[in-house]
Amino acid sequence: MATPRLSGGLVSAIRILAESPLRGLVWRSMGQSYGLFGLNDLPEEAHGVPSLEERAVAGAPPRTGPDEEGEAAAPRKGTARALRLAYQRQGTTPVAVLEALRARVERAEFGKAGRSPFIALAWARAHALAEASAARWRAGRPLGPLDGVPVPVKDEHDMVGLPTMGGTRWRTQLAGQDSLVVQRLEAAGALVYGKTHTTEWGMSPLGFNPCQPMPRNVYSRDHAPGGSSTGSAVAVALGMAPVAVGSDGGGSIRIPAAMNGLFGLKPNFVRVPRAGDIFADGTVSHIGPIGRSVEDLVDLLGVIAGPDPRDPLSAYPGAAPVASWRAALGRGVQGVRIGVDEAEWADAAPEVARVADEALRGLEREGARRVSVKVPYAKEAPAAGVLVIANETMGGLLRCLPHLPEMGEDLRIILALLRGCATEHYFAARSVRAGLRRNLAAVMAGVDLLALPTTAALPPAWPFEEDQTAIVDEVANQQAVRFSFLANLTGLPAGTAPAGMVDGLPVGLQLVGDAHDEASVIAGLAAVERLGIGRVPDPDGFVPLESVARG
């Protein structure tokens, strides 16, 4: 049974116990709550041979869409396409847009989010990029779809002259080199003007972080915004960028995107190389976009994806299939087989499942076909995922243990408990992970997409006054990641689309594709957007960038 939500002094008390010789008491309690101890006892069919590379396994040959590209969604407010149209018509300029963004940040215009989505800003650097972009637009020679588009990056990417804090308070050394993602974005003309808040070392899926003053949900200042790509989602939702870079180790793109009414895409494992990314040590983390439209996701992913010799796992056969992703924007869902595991959906709160199912029925009305499937042992994915990501995080932080007193109490609890994690539990998780990869590939052989709610519950309450406070909320954590770890463990592409609202808070529909098949996920998400199936209202404080006067 999960412990109730704890904060402040109670978390400190648990941390003291976890770091004492009595840590086994806390380990047993939390391990039973998350189901960590039963993985080794599962039947043989649940297990497989762990991979040394953790590559995704395809269930079917590559899928193809119509020969001709269909019609993408009409440009929405605040999207990169709307901004490009404004540049083309000389209604505004990249310099004017950047100056307006700076003014908004300095005036602290963050709507119900209440606090800035940024941990660091690089206005001078971005201004030089904006001047160069403005010159290209005047000459009618933009570099591509991101030229002059503001694109913040999550604070796990190195940027010269800025610290890469990763949600901590102690990583203050300035970076001497840009990450590969930043390099590729700026080479495409994007205005990388800021780094966005993440939870401490990316470990909270809810947005909690005792080390930094975090923004709240853009629809309610007293609810969690999701994590760990918290700031990226909030910045996009407020109109401070059409699209931003996030990362996803257990739902960290999809969860905050869903909780803030946005689109998000976790691509195939290492579709985006990880040089200069401090969260890149593990085997479940994926870099990807959060955006206001699916086209924005494709625009960004098309720039940052592609092999890098420093990251051998990024060496897919051939180049990143950007053309197929763009064509998928108008492909539609006629004849698309969408798998639904009713036993999985039953674990979502009824109101969340209802709204996500209504969005799925909208796709059925457009010609998609619902197929009943069973994903064997999918319910074990959260336990296996927690063990894998937590142990890999521990490994990445071993050299940082001298900074343990400066870490948040909640992260210290995790690190202390992992010292009591038996080898058998970790390798049982890896074995179950291999079984999930094999079993899910068999399911994907018979369908084109798998549909799930993005989260099992609405964003949990988080009083605005409760800031920079250590919080442990096992129930809310488990509800957030219930349906997301499956795609991280298998490396399959997965995205989220807004499905509607419940009690003033957004709900997301998640679509999972076969290995290397981002195109089918993009096609499904784009159909949701184009049909307006689950469109949510703009939050308070949203200002579209294309409305900025030329100046």
Image (cartoon, grey):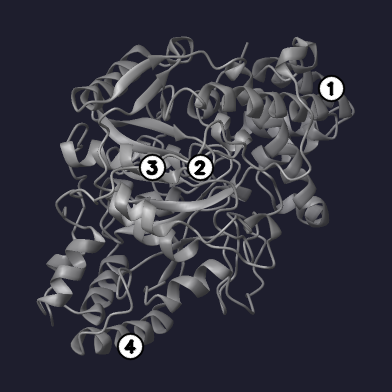
Q: Distance between the Cα atoms at labels 2 and 1?
A: 29 Å
Q: Which badge, 4 or 3, comes first in the chain's sequence? A: 3
Q: Is residue 167 left or right of residue 40?
A: left
Badge 3 element: loop
Q: Which mark is residue 132?
A: 4
Q: Distance between the Cα atoms at labels 1 and 3?
A: 52 Å
Q: Which is more toward the observer, 392 or 516?
A: 516
Residue 508, by quadrant, is top left
Disc 3 crowd rating (10 Å Cα; few below 14, some 14-19, many 20+) is: few
What residue type is disc 2 on? Ser
Check if mark 4's residue and mark 1's residue have beta carbons within 8 Å: no
Q: Which badge, 4 or 1, comes first in the chain's sequence? A: 1
Question: What residue would you read off at disc 2?
Answer: 252
What residue type is disc 3 on? Thr
Badge 2 element: loop
Q: Which mark is residue 64?
A: 3
Q: Distance between the Cα atoms at labels 4 and 3?
A: 39 Å
Disc 4 crowd rating (10 Å Cα; few below 14, some 14-19, many 20+) is: some
Q: Which mark is residue 24?
A: 1
**Image: 30 above or below 81:** above
Q: Is residue 411 left or right of residue 518?
A: right
Kindly report which numbered mark, 1 or 3, lies closer to the viewer in this rendering: 3
